Image: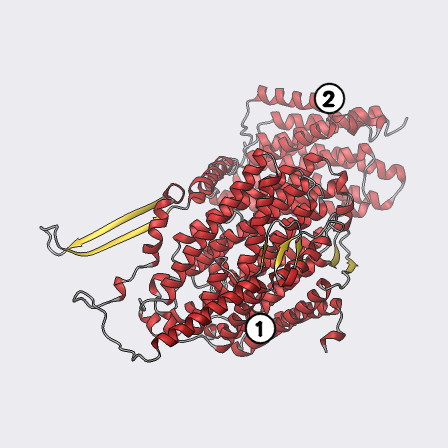
Amino acid sequence: MDFFSAQFLFFVQTLLFASVIFMHLSKKSASVIFLYQVQSLIVACLLLGSALAESAIFPLFVAVVVCAVKVVIAPHFFRRLTRELQLKFSASTYLSGPLTLIILAALTAFTYSHFFAPLSTLNASNARALLLAAAMMLAALFLIVNRKGALSQMIGILSLENAIVAFAFLSGLEQSPALELGVLFDILMWIIIATVFASMVYRQFGSLDVTAMNSLKEE
Amino acid sequence: MFTAVSAQSSFFLALLFLGLGSLGSACLWKKDAAANWWGNLCAITASVFGLLSAIRVLLGGAAFSLAADSPLGALSFSFTVDKLSAFFIFVISLIALPASIYGLGYVKHYYGRYSPGVLGFFYNLFLAGLFLVVSADNALFFLTVWEIMSLASYFLVIFEHREPDNISAGTRYFIMTHAGTACIILAFLVLYRFTGSFEFDVIRENFAAVPAYAKNIVFLLTLAGFGTKAGIIPLHIWLPSAHPAAPTHVSALMSGVMIKTGIYMFIRILIDFSPGAPLWWGIAVLLIGAASSLFGVLYALTEHDIKKLLAYHSIENIGIILLGLGSALVFWAAGAESLAMLGLIAALFHTLNHAVFKALLFLGAGSVISQTRTRNMEEYGGLIRTMPYTAALFLTGSLAISALPPFNGFASEWLTFQSLFSGFGSFGRSVAGVFALSAGALAFTGGLAAACFVKAFGATFLARPRSVEAARSRESAPSMVLGMGVLALLTLVIGIFSGVVSRVLSVVVADRPGFSTVPVPVSVPAASLSLGSGFAAMSLPLVFVSLAAVSALVAFLTYLATAGRRVKIGRTWDCGTDLTPRMEITATGFSRSLISIFRGILKPSKQTTIEYRDADSRFFPQTRSVKLEIKDVYSAYFYRPVERLTMALAAQIKKIQCGNVNAYIVYLFAALIALLVWAVI
């Protein structure tokens, strides 16, 4: 059996997409972090499988680093943040649950419309999975828009990054391992800075709800 | 020595000296006197080389070009000095030479207060920008040097940066000049879209391929972009504040030369690039010219700031130049090439003349200001006794700008009149009406300009001093008098030899595409100026000789009649009250009756304040003051509403910046979706 058959990849992409949907529905910070961990693990496994199939050392190393950064280090930082700041619930949203789901359905339908047809030509055999990856990107972006908590927004950004990696993998637009390592380093730095910054914001405002930071606006 | 140097070498030597002047002045910024001498001497040398280069090309020499590619693709360092460029280089150099001589003396009063090194740096850079603007042959290179010229002049406007008014004037100039530059960039982009090149030669060759609607867009953008620099109404609002703010010799260059770069580009684009332009282009230029000349002089009448008065007269004279250019465009559209040539000669002639007499008047005003420390004419008076040379030279400039024979202003306005009269007799009712309106505006302008300079000269030099500074004033430094003297002589020489100058200008016009085979409309029989068609003729040498003879005769007769008499000096009967300067008619008082005639346009407001000796009695006033103010109708009815609309829109747009991160991401999200949809559609 072909390990990276179109059907298998579509299944994997469905899992990734589902993880973002569940993030939208999840109310607890711990659940959102766990979903991100699962999502990152799936992405790392995809990269690992690809590296093993090609028997290439450097991509294998990249996959291991991806796993370390996204599956171990990032969730660790986020959990420590929630512990320190007592952020059990950080799932305050602008839109209600049903409305959120309606918009997600509309976004997914939009990605399967003719507007996104040019994207599916990047890799015709994975067309359905590619469009789902695009839907995942929009859903992750919508997560950032809809959530008021900074933690959820940070995880939304990282999910968007996972969606882009998945899209690149499915379309065959993977970059050189050196470049991927560079991007990973950027992500790691961003996570560290963002968590430190979130702590400082919390100390200043007593909340990670971005609507509480409106007073920063210049009058 | 100079005959050994070619036109091309002279041109590049001029640029070299300007570069040396600029860098040297910057290096000497701590040594006031050395920086002043270095900066102005380099400018003087560059002007001499500029004159040599231009004269060689104008008197039969071939045009020269130089092109060097740059690593930035479409940008190439392309120069071409054809006869039109040479004419403008001649005008720039002709004014820069006396202005720089004048600067040697004038800049001294900045010692210890402002840095002459900084002034020399920007002054030479500004001159280099002027030279390059009229010789650039590539649109991108042109825009680069246009920006150098604009920025250098901006820094010269705010040179006396401790004066808050100067900063305000500079800001206004900066905004307006860049709004104009935006229009110019758009015009070149439209041309690039249809001709595929930024090279002027390629644009010229392929202009026929530009669709009519795009040509009209280019015309409107050209009018707005270069019209802003030229100071046409209603885009002139920067000019009356910026020109007076700069050091006087820079004001002379800005008013006499810089605004003419707008005229230069009008001719390049509307005549050179687009032969056979539609009739309405010419009509539009004529109407704008008529409005600019008339309103310019009306606003000048209301001014008592001597430099602002001169700045408003620049708007008036740009209007007169546009009357010549507009008539040329109309004639060309109608296929009357010879008359079009006449209109263009008139426009170029007035370009030269205005540069000369306006520079002279600005330098004269600067001499007065350097002595009295004020620009307010109400505080002058009686300066003819303390500054006789300046008074005589200012009077010469006043006669020239008032278009009185035999000075140069008369010759070019006469040619403009002939061009307009020809149009009146050559077209149907509606177009002839525009020509009649333009001729009427020009006649009216001439009369009002004369009245304005009666006021300016009278209030400044005649009667008694109205301030302590005016009473203590001294004649200007010799270099300043020399600078003005050269220009005063030029007003007379150009006027007397206007026929010869017109012939040279006909060579410049004949060098334009489409004019090479056109019969020259002017002839010079016995040094007089005659239209080829026999429509009109005049002889300024004869006028000059007649005036000189009559003056000599009057002087001789007066001498004969009074030779045997003794001169008795006695007190004027003064009704028992001592004569004081307060009894003189002021500049405001002089213009008040004229302002009241045009109150519908000028919207004057009068505030009278009376203080009485006795609080209970109204029969014995102690003081009575009248404050006359003129409403700036352009600001009130155009710029202020535009400003209010912009601010209201900005307040609405500001709501987008709500301070919520989620909202910002929604904007990104919406933009992303919109781009996707747009890309597919």
**Image location (x, y in percent) of residue A69:** 71, 43
Q: Relative to residue B58, is residue A9 depicted above or below?
A: above
- The residue drawn where x is 77% and y is 52% is B73
**Which residue bears the numbered disc 2?**
A113
Q: Secondary structure at mark 2?
A: loop
- The residue drawn where x is 75% and y is 69% is B9
Q: Nearest the camera: B271 or A10?
A: B271
| Corner quadrant of residue B673 | top right
| Corner quadrant of residue A138 | top right
Q: Chain of mark 1?
A: B
**Image location (x, y in percent) of residue B254:** 55, 60
Q: Nearest the camera: B452 or B171?
A: B452
- The residue drawn where x is 38% and y is 46% is B631
Q: Relative to residue B612, is residue B356 depicted above or below?
A: below
Q: CA distance from mark 2 to mark 1?
A: 71 Å
User: Is residue B370 in view from this perspective?
Assistant: no
**Which residue bears the numbered disc 1?**
B40
Which amino acid, mark 1? Answer: Asn
Q: Chain of mark 2?
A: A
**Image location (x, y in percent) of residue B672:** 66, 33
Q: Look at the numbered discs 2 and 1 and tell me whether their residues touch, using CB distance below 8 Å.
A: no
| Corner quadrant of residue A132 | top right
Which amino acid, mark 2? Answer: Ser
Left or right of B211: which side holds B460? Answer: left
Q: Relative to residue B502, is residue A36 depicted above or below?
A: above
**Image location (x, y in percent) of residue B567:** 29, 78
Q: In the picture, which quadrant includes the N terminus of chain B?
A: bottom right
Which numbered mark, 2 or 1, is in the foreground of this view?
1
